[in-house]
Amino acid sequence: MASELNDETSQVGSKINSSRAKTMSTTPLLNPIQLDSKIEAIDNFIYLSQLITIVREHTREIRRQKQAGWAVFQQYRNLLTSCTVNMKYKQRLFNQCIIREMMHSFECWALMKKGRDIWR
């Protein structure tokens, strides 16, 4: 099937880059997919800033989102910890940048108790 897809794309002047292509499957592949070379099988990847895994377990994604929020906080640390900046502006910056980064695609998660505990 992959070779057929590669043939069809080459007819329109495109080509699948086998060095960048990856496969992900819920069951082990008996025969690895090959184009020019063997395509790497993976168990997780990041798509649109969200960690996609085969196992429905969001603890790694929650940790990633928390780290992303802390990274944004570090960018604005001087402003957020300053005594001279009005609290109203600190709140606005926090809500618009840090909370937004931490909650990115949060509504899609089906959290289990372990995930809720990590989030707190």
Image (spheres, rainbow, N blue to C red):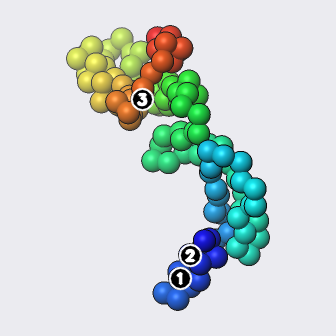
Instruction: Report the residue at 76% width, 70% height from top.
Output: 37
Q: Which mark is residue 70?
A: none
Residue kind at label 2, given as amino acid type: Leu
Secondary structure beneath dot 3 equals loop
Q: Are marks 3 and 1 in contact (CB under 8 Å)?
A: no
- Residue 29 is situated, as x and y percent measured from the top left of the image, at 71, 54
78 and 110: which is toward the camera: 110
The answer to whether 49 is drawn above or below residue 75 in the figure is below
Above or below residue 69? Residue 51 is below
Q: Quadrant of the N terminus?
A: bottom right
Q: Amino acid at mark 1?
A: Glu
- What SS does tag 2 mark? helix
The foreground one among 71 and 81 is: 71
- Across and down, in percent, residue 104 comes to 39, 34
**Three-letter amino acid code of the residue under disc 3:** Trp
Q: Quadrant of residue 110?
A: top left
Residue drawn at (56%, 24%) of the image: 59
Q: Badge 1: few (under 14), some or many (20 or more) residues near its Cα, within 10 Å?
A: few
Residue at position x 42%, y 15% from top? 81
Q: Are marks 1 and 2 in contact (CB under 8 Å)?
A: yes
Q: Which mark is residue 5?
A: 2
The disc, 2 or 3, on the residue closer to the chain's N-terminal end is: 2
Label 1 sits on residue: 8
Q: Is residue 20 above or below residue 100?
A: below
Rendering coords of residue 94 (x, y %)? 34, 23
x 38%, y 33%: residue: 108
Mark nearest the camera among 2 and 3 is 2
Quarter-of-image position of residue 2: bottom right
Which residue is label 3 attached to?
109
